């Protein structure tokens, strides 16, 4: 089926959500869904777009383009994949395995975080083909049309820098509360930060320096996604007790990082947070951590996790066959 839109001939590979899929170099999300769920998914996608989230979905692939190539390129370039699951989502036949292919590309080829939104509940354990891709994804509440799931989802996407302001650019602050009563100009430091959505904390978006030993400023509440991404000279990081979460890919490809201690204030560590930290030999994870994302320590070949006996981190280490040592707190 062909149509003419804005002077271009387009092929409708799936349903039109009522807006153009995002094409550009800014961070965006890739939507993975089944056509049978189009009405609900398009509603959520539209609301995300209206709230400033850049969204790509597979409508309007140009004639002559190979579907798999286009899908692969957009999964490669996206920040995260949103998987809208339902009984329809898990149905497979010889002519309809696109969703499984997309999940496989996201996890196996490009190691992208997968955010699962249940639009209709279904026991994933009944669908063995999907078990390796979705259980460790970031799961949100079942979609029921209320704003709580949407707000939580947008908050996560904002931390991934996928949310724009009304003028189309990311809001980035140049100051950070180093002490409750004091603000310091970030030009003095090698940090780029912005306020959290509720305005009560600060997210470290990016470390721009080249120091081997770094102390995160007191007052930072979140180490954002890719904050220290590919800081190849980094050997040690001191994290203050103000930090409560470490984002996805936060220390990805920090080849020289050897040791780090997670303070008792931290409750979550994101997907691929320490991916490919080849030199990391020891990390101390306290009882306070109750969530560790998929493949947080992927390819950390020499790692030993130090953690209290019976902690969440100890169970995680056992499940992932990571060396660990029990300590007392």
Image (cartoon, rainbow, N blue to C red):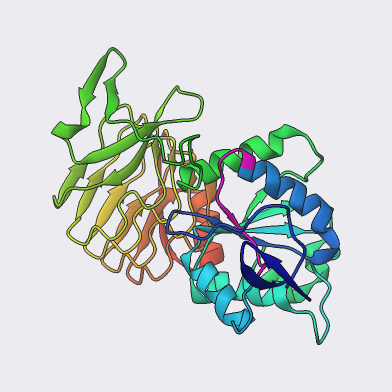
Magenta stretch, main secondary structure, is: loop
**Quadrant holding the C terminus:** top left
| Residue in view at x 80 percent, y 85 percent | 95
Q: Is residue 170 left or right of residue 98?
A: left
Q: Is residue 159 above or below residue 105?
A: above
Q: Is residue 180 above or below residue 126?
A: above
Foreground pick, 203 / 36: 36
Q: Quadrant of the N terminus?
A: bottom right
Residue occupying image coordinates x 70% and y 33%: 148
Residue 164 falls within the magenta-colored stretch: no
Give the magenta range.
Answer: 50-60
Q: Is residue 194 visible?
A: yes
Residue 88, position in %: x, y?
85, 65
> Taking 316 as reference, is 124 left or right?
right
Extreme-front residue of the structure = 7
**Of 277 and 16, which appears nearest the observer?**
16
- Residue 57 within the magenta-colored segment of the rendering: yes
Quarter of the image holding residue 232? bottom left
Nearest the eye: 244 or 263:
244
Whether residue 59 is visible: no
Q: Residue furthest top?
A: 181
Query: Is 135 left, or right, of 211 in this rendering?
Result: right
Count of residue discs: 0
* Quarter holding residue 31: bottom right
> Which residue is painted at 69% across and 49% down in the image?
45
Q: Is residue 137 above or below residue 312?
A: below
Task: Tell me which residue sits at (84%, 73%) in the image.
Answer: 91
- When the figure is inspected, residue 168 is found, relative to residue 85, above or below; the finding is above
> Could you say where residue 79 lies in the image, as x and y percent from the top left?
49, 58
In the image, 79: left or right of 211? right
Provide residue 161's location: percent of width, then percent of height: 45, 46
Q: Position of residue 24 (x, y in %)?
A: 46, 59
């Amino acid at each position: 089926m062909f149509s003419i839109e804005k002077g271009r001939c387009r092929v409708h590979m799936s349903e039109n959500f009522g807006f153009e899929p995002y094409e550009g170099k800014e961070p965006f999300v890739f939507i993975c869904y089944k056509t049978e769920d189009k009405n609900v998914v398009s509603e959520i996608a539209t609301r995300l777009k209206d709230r400033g989230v850049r969204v790509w979905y597979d409508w309007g692939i140009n004639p002559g383009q190979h579907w798999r190539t286009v899908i692969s390129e957009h999964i490669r370039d996206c920040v995260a994949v949103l998987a809208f699951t339902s009984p329809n989502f898990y149905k497979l036949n010889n002519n309809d395995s696109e969703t499984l292919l997309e999940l496989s590309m996201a996890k196996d080829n490009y190691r992208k975080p997968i955010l699962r939104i249940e639009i209709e509940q279904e026991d994933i354990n009944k669908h063995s083909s999907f078990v390796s891709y979705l259980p460790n994804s970031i799961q949100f509440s079942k979609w029921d049309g209320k704003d709580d799931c949407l707000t939580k989802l947008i908050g996560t996407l904002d931390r991934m820098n996928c949310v724009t302001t009304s003028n189309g650019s990311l809001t980035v602050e140049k100051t950070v509360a180093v002490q409750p009563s004091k603000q310091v100009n970030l030009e003095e430091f090698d940090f780029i930060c912005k306020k959290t959505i509720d305005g009560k904390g600060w997210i470290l978006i990016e470390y721009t320096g080249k120091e081997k030993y770094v102390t995160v400023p007191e007052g930072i509440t979140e180490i954002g996604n890719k904050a220290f991404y590919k800081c190849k000279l980094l050997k040690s990081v001191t994290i203050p007790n103000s930090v409560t979460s470490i984002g996805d890919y936060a220390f990805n490809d920090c080849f020289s990082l050897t040791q780090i201690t997670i303070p008792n204030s931290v409750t979550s560590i994101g997907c691929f947070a320490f991916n490919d930290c080849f030199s990391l030999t020891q990390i101390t994870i306290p009882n306070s951590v109750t969530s560790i994302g998929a493949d947080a320590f992927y390819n950390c070949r020499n790692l030993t996790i130090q953690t209290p006996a019976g902690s969440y981190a100890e169970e995680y280490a056992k499940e992932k066959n990571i060396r660990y040592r029990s300590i007392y707190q």
